[in-house]
Every structure is written in structure tokens, then in C-alpha cells.
């Protein structure tokens, strides 16, 4: 390779045309491959399977389903990469997002699985496994985790400093990343804009000393514009050239910023050696090798799929939901039109639904007893995309899904808003009112053009609605402004069900107090309306669980820039009673827990025990239960959380039957980071093993001694 070719390959384009080497490219992909098209490059949009936003994927509490969804994404990325008509390699998907939702005001909490490190790490591991495949040497696609590290504020993110100690680094903020690399096998990561303890992440020494050397990561990517921010916002360097040189020395080998001329000049003057460039690229081409781009004939072989050729939505989906235009390309077996991918999408949408309230069994609704139903609200007839989502092959809105479910014999009265008494009239004329409310994940209709430097934000205009958030802008309030519409509807129809489709928590205290039923979903699923209708009318029993603590007031939260979660963040350290606790969710049936037994009477270093509990469905409907294992340290000599999630399983339990659920617990998961010795330490302790239906609903517990 020439020096020019080497420097070119430090971008996202790793192609070497002269040598016939293909690029692994890049695409966003946290809940579906993103190919929205590009007018400048005359690239048409490509429709791909779109799953719920990551909090919704998390709310399934089903790691295997997350793995299946990622496998769908990986297969679609490889399909696009290898189709000559697309001519667009996107073997590397930028996902999963391994950050933690430590604060519900964070504008990008829509991109992560939840607030708990073990939970998020489990989902990250399964996403990576699904995306890359089961063969560690022949990948289907490549994962690039974002954004390392502690990147959970948008306002002033271009120069902010996340301050916390080494214990929180090892025990909280880095956990999902470490699990994704060490347990999942991911080999790529993107550094975040912020600093950690005064050192910007793009030049932080831990990129080499920990991420590369200890966790085996090969691609260290800067974020878009991050190199420039090192001297304009962080004030660490005098100019772009100095910042580029520092990034190269820190191990960055993928730039999303201006770097080529600066790198060439640095090599010529000797501040960066060509041998150093070689070392950076050697790691990067490991990814190409695993993807089969350097050894044709040895690449990943996808399984045969059952793609349909008519590009139609799956059974039960209204034809009006199909967003594609008839074209010659629709006759080819695109994987996003296959029954297999549709089935994974619909299962993900169904499992993500969380039942927050169901007073007096208001749900499910009886279609035979209903003559009319009102479908009301600004989100009732849309499926919202977000900044990191693509275009689906079809999209079923709540209104579409409900109409398809009730058929022609039930009158559906639709009203988008309260304008001209439309919502009130629709509610009055109906037996039941379904009010669909929530946030706008793009924070306005023109997100792509709303990037502006502001004195208080992260590079974007303020959201029109204060409770909205997005990349570059944190939420100013947790108040759901559209709750006013809910109040109006409930005033004229006591049979009102709130469907909250949102990327993050809201302080819906009024609705929780008065409404008979509340459901929660996240945005962007192509099967949103189908899943909602199945839950509303009892064709599916919801079992989703919350992945963050929902406060009842903004006053319950520490200041936004307080990164020391011990000051009252997450269920582990929350000081007040929340509106809804972490792990919370209801069902149309009830479950009884009994007979907790542990496989060991004590736990020693290097060992693992199994906790087994019997779960009985005491209701009349089949349903899934999410069994959660928490631990609490009773005699620790160092400060510990009130409780910590260390295992969980979502299991189907038929009505009237009992299943035994087993959850493993490793002694290593009980260790803490000893800052003095700079290593993990398992102390002599007594630990309470707690089994329950949420972090606040512990049904059984048993204490055991722990020894190093």
C-alpha cells in the first residue's frame, strides 16, 4: 500500500481499489439498518426491518430475541453490501449503543437499553452475537459499540466533563462495553465527545491501556467532528493538525472528521511514523479479514431464507400500511420482505409492550361487547422514525392495527387532537377511548436541518416541546404536555386507556391516579399498531418490564451533570418512592413464587451457584413472567448499592401450571473494584439473594455467606 492508500483507509472507507480490497463501510444500526438515501450521492432509500427503539427492545427482557433481531439486521446489512444494484458496502453497523440511561432527562436515552449495567451488558452481548454470528472467525457483519464513555448528557456535550471515580468506571459505566467486547466478541468502538475526569475520550489513554490492550478492540473510531472539538471546545490543542496527531497516538484508526492532509503532513515531518500508521491499520484489517473481505470464498455463508416475492406486509397488516412503491426490485427476494424477518419484528413489538396499570381488569377489551371505539391523539395514526432509524418496508399505525383487529362491525371514531372538539366528540360517541400520546423522537419536523451552535445545547435547536429530547438536546421537563388531552377525554368517557408511546419516562402521576389502564411502548417498530391491537384485545398477554426508574417528580433527581450515581440515581441508589420502579410491569394473569432453593449453601471465589424458584400461573390466561434475581450485600466493608440485578429470565407459564426457573449467579459478579490495589476484589461477606417480579417486588430471598 502507498502512504496515500494507508491514510485513506483511516476513514470509514477501507477499500483499496488498486488491490481489489473491498471496504467494510458503515451504517447506523441500533434498531434496524439505516439506509435513508442520499440526494447528494444519488442514493435511493433502502427499506429495512425496523424494530422498536432500544429501550423497547430492552423492555422485552428477552436477550435471545434481541439476538434474533440483531441477526436480522446483520443479514440485511450483508445482503445490501453484496448486491451489485446497491453498490454500497455496510458490513459494519454502528451499534449497539452500550451507554447507560442514568438520567431520564438525557436526550439520547432513546438509544440505550436501560439504566442497569448488567442488564444493558446482557443485551449488548446478545446483540453482538446476533449481528456477527456464531463463528468468531467468519462474521456476518461487524458491531461498533457507541459511545465510550459516560456519554449521557446532550447539553454542552461537546465540552462537558463526566466526573466519577474508578469504582464507578469499573462497576457501572464501562460494564456494558466490557461485556460486549469480552463476552460478546465485538471489536469496534466509537469514542464519545465528552471528557472523563478532565481528559477527552478521543485522546484518553484508556483507549489503548484498557479498551485495546485488555479488551481486544481493533477499531477505535472518533465521533463526527470530535477531533475538531478537541481544540475548539475542549481547548486541549492549538489546531486540527495537533488534534489529529494526538488521536493517532491515542490509537484512533477511524476518523469521522478532517484528518487526511494533517496526517500526511505529520508523517512527512516525523511527528507520526508510517510504522505507526501500519500498526493502526493492521488492527483495522482484522475486521476485514473476519468479514471475508480479504480472503474471498471464506466469508460468512448466510442461511437460506424464505423471502416472499410480493413485498406485502405480514398477515393481519392493513394493505395501507405498505410504504413501498411497486418497482422491479420488489420482485427480488429482499430479506426484509421475508416471513422470517416479519415474524421476528412482530414478536419484538409484542414482547416490548409494558402494562403499567390495569385497574379492575379494564384490559383486555372484549371486541364482542364493543360497538364503537375512539382512537385519539397525535400519535394514533403514525409510526415515528428517529434519528438512528431507517425506513421500514411497511408500518402499522395504532389506528391501522385497531381497525384491522375490530373489523367492519365496530365503528372506529378517529380524532388527531382536541381541535374543534374532535377528541371530545369521538370519546363521547364511543364505548371506549384509546388515547395515543407521547414524544416526538425527532424533536420537530426538520431534524436534519436543526443543527445549530447554541449557548446551552449540544449543537441543536431547542425542542419546541420542553419534554422532548434528541441528540444534542436534553429534556427540560418530564411532564407529558399531552396529558391534558388525556384529562379531557377521560372527563367525558371513564373507559379511557392511555397508550404512551415514548422514548423515555414521564411523570404521569395524574394518569396513574385516575385512568383505569395505561400501556407503554417505544417508537419506530414497523409492527407497532399490530402489537398494540393484539394486547388491547387480549390476543396477546403483555409481559414487558421497565428498564429505567420512572420518577414521580423532577425533584427526585440529582443535578444533570452529577455523574456519581450514588447521589440518588437508578434503582440501586434512588432515595424516594418512584412512580414506577425498575423492572416493573403487569400481566393479564397473576403469578405466585415459591420454593426458592440454592445449589450451594455458600459461595467461594471462582464458583457459581444456581437459584431455582417455582413460578405458578394462578390466573386463567397463559402468560410470560419475568423472574428477576437481585443481590444485596449485608456485611460489605465498602459502600454498596441497595440491590443489584444479577440475573433474569423471561419464561412462558401456561394458566394453572408451575414452571421451575433457574438463574445462575457467579461469585465474580459479587466483587467490587479495589481502587488501592487497582483490581477486582471478592470480600468475605453475607449476601441476600432476592427473587422477585421487579426491583421493588421481591417475593423470596435467602442469605448465604461469601468467601474469597
Image (tube, helix red, strand yellow):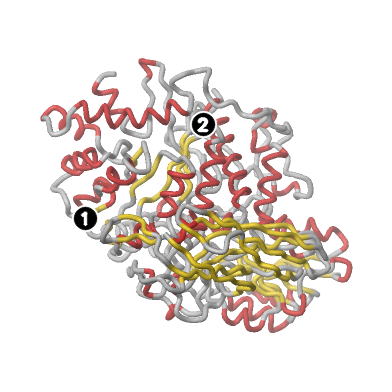
Q: Quadrant of the C terminus?
A: bottom left
Left or right, residue 63 beside residue 553:
right
Q: Which numbered dot is residue 139?
A: 2
- Structural crowding at the residue carrying mark 2, measured as other residues with C-alpha within 10 Å and reported as few (<14), some (14–19) or many (≥20): many
Instruction: Pinpoint residue 211: horizontal percent, then vertical percent.
Output: 34, 45
Residue at point 69%, 84% (across, down): 491
* Residue 648 quadrant: bottom right
Task: Judge the density around disc 1: few (<14), some (14-19), many (≥20) Cα neighbours within 10 Å.
Answer: many
Q: CA distance from mark 1 to mark 2?
A: 37 Å
Residue nearest the viewer, comparing 449 with 102: 102
Q: Is residue 563 above or below residue 51?
A: below
At horizontal 17% and vertical 40% (from top left) the residue drawn is 241
Please tell me whether mark 1 sits on a helix, a strand or a loop. Answer: loop
Residue at image position (69%, 43%) is 342
User: In the rendered structure, are the residues bearing label 1 and label 2 in contact, judged by CB atoms less than 8 Å apart?
Assistant: no
Quarter of the picture holding the N terminus: top left
Q: Secondary structure at mark 2?
A: loop
User: Which residue of the protein is positioned furthest toward the left in this rendering?
Assistant: 269
Residue on which disc 1 sits: 234
Q: Nearer the viewer, mark 1 or mark 2?
A: 2
Residue 191 position, x and y percent, is 33, 48
Given residues 339 and 426, the one toward you in this image is 339
Amino acid at each position: 500500500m502507498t502512504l496515500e492508500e494507508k491514510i485513506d483507509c483511516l476513514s470509514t472507507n477501507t477499500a483499496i481499489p488498486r488491490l481489489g480490497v473491498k471496504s467494510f463501510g458503515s451504517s447506523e444500526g441500533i434498531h434496524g439498518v439505516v439506509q435513508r438515501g442520499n440526494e447528494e450521492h444519488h442514493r435511493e432509500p433502502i427499506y429495512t426491518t425496523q424494530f422498536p427503539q432500544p429501550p423497547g427492545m430492552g423492555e422485552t427482557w428477552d436477550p435471545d430475541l434481541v439476538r434474533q433481531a440483531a441477526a436480522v439486521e446483520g443479514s440485511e446489512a450483508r445482503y445490501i453490501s453484496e448486491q451489485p444494484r446497491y453498490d454500497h458496502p455496510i458490513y459494519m453497523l454502528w451499534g449497539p449503543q452500550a451507554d447507560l440511561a442514568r438520567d431520564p432527562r438525557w436526550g439520547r436515552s432513546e438509544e440505550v437499553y436501560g439504566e442497569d449495567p448488567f442488564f444493558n451488558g446482557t443485551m449488548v452481548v446478545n446483540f453482538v452475537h446476533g449481528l456477527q454470528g456464531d463463528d468468531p472467525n467468519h462474521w456476518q457483519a461487524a458491531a461498533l459499540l457507541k459511545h465510550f464513555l459516560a456519554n449521557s448528557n446532550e447539553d454542552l456535550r461537546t465540552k462537558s466533563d463526566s466526573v466519577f471515580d474508578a469504582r464507578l468506571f469499573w462497576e457501572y459505566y464501562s460494564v456494558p462495553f466490557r461485556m460486549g467486547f469480552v463476552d460478546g466478541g465485538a471489536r469496534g468502538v466509537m469514542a464519545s465527545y465528552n471528557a472523563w475526569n478532565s481528559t477527552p475520550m478521543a485522546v484518553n489513554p484508556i483507549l489503548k491501556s484498557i479498551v485495546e490492550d485488555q479488551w481486544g478492540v481493533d477499531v477505535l473510531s472518533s465521533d463526527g467532528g470530535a477531533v475538531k472539538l478537541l481544540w475548539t471546545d475542549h481547548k486541549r490543542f492549538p489546531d486540527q493538525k495537533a488534534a489529529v496527531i494526538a488521536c493517532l497516538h491515542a490509537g484512533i484508526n477511524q476518523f469521522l472528521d478532517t484528518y487526511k492532509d494533517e496526517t500526511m503532513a505529520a508523517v512527512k515531518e516525523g511527528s507520526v511514523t508510517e510504522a505507526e500508521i501500519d500498526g493502526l491499520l493492521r488492527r483495522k484489517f482484522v475486521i476485514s479479514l473476519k468479514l471475508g473481505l480479504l480472503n474471498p470464498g471464506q466469508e460468512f455463508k448466510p442461511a437460506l431464507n424464505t423471502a416472499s416475492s410480493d413485498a406485502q406486509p405480514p398477515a393481519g397488516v392493513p394493505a395501507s400500511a405498505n410504504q413501498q412503491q411497486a418497482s422491479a426490485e420488489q420482485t427480488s427476494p429482499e430479506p426484509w420482505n421475508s416471513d422470517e424477518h416479519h415474524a421476528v419484528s412482530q414478536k419484538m413489538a409484542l414482547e416490548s409492550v409494558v402494562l403499567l396499570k390495569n385497574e379492575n381488569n379494564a384490559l383486555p377489551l372484549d371486541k364482542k361487547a364493543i360497538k364503537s371505539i375512539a382512537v385519539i391523539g397525535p400519535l394514533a395514526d403514525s409510526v415515528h422514525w428517529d434519528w438512528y432509524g431507517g425506513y421500514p418496508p411497511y408500518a402499522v399505525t395504532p389506528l391501522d392495527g385497531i381497525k384491522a383487529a375490530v373489523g367492519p362491525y365496530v365503528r372506529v371514531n378517529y380524532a388527531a387532537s382536541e381541535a374543534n372538539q374532535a377528541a371530545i366528540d369521538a370519546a363521547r360517541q364511543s364505548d371506549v377511548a384509546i388515547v395515543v400520546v407521547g414524544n416526538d423522537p425527532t424533536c420537530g419536523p426538520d431534524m436534519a436541518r436543526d443543527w445549530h451552535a447554541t449557548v446551552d445545547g449540544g449543537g441543536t435547536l431547542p425542542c419546541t416541546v420542553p419534554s422532548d429530547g434528541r441528540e444534542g438536546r436534553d429534556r427540560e421537563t418530564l411532564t407529558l404536555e399531552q396529558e391534558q388531552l388525556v384529562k379531557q377525554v377521560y372527563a367525558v368517557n371513564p373507559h379511557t386507556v392511555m397508550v404512551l408511546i415514548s422514548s423515555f419516562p414521564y411523570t404521569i402521576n395524574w394518569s396513574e391516579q385516575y385512568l383505569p389502564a395505561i400501556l407503554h411502548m417505544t417508537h419506530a417498530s414497523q409492527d407497532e399498531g399490530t402489537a398494540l391491537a393484539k394486547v388491547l384485545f387480549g390476543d396477546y398477554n403483555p409481559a414487558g418490564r421497565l428498564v429505567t426508574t420512572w420518577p414521580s417528580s423532577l425533584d427526585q433527581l440529582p443535578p444533570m451533570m452529577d455523574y456519581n450515581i450514588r447521589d440518588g440515581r437508578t434503582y440501586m441508589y434512588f432515595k424516594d418512592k418512584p412512580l414506577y420502579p425498575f423492572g416493573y410491569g403487569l400481566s393479564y394473569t397473576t403469578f405466585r413464587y415459591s420454593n426458592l432453593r440454592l445449589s450451594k449453601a455458600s459461595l467461594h471465589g471462582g464458583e457459581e451457584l444456581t437459584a431455582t424458584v417455582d413460578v405458578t400461573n394462578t390466573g386463567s390466561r397463559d402468560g410470560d413472567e419475568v423472574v428477576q434475581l437481585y443481590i444485596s450485600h449485608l456485611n460489605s466493608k465498602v459502600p454498596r448499592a441497595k440491590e443489584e440485578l444479577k440475573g433474569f429470565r423471561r419464561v412462558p407459564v401456561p394458566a394453572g401450571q408451575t414452571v421451575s426457573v433457574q438463574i445462575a449467579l457467579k461469585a465474580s459478579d459479587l466483587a467490587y473494584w479495589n481502587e488501592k490495589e487497582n483490581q477486582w476484589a471478592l470480600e468475605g461477606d453475607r449476601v441476600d439473594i432476592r427473587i422477585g417480579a421487579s426491583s421493588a417486588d421481591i417475593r423470596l430471598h435467602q442469605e448465604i455467606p461469601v468467601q474469597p
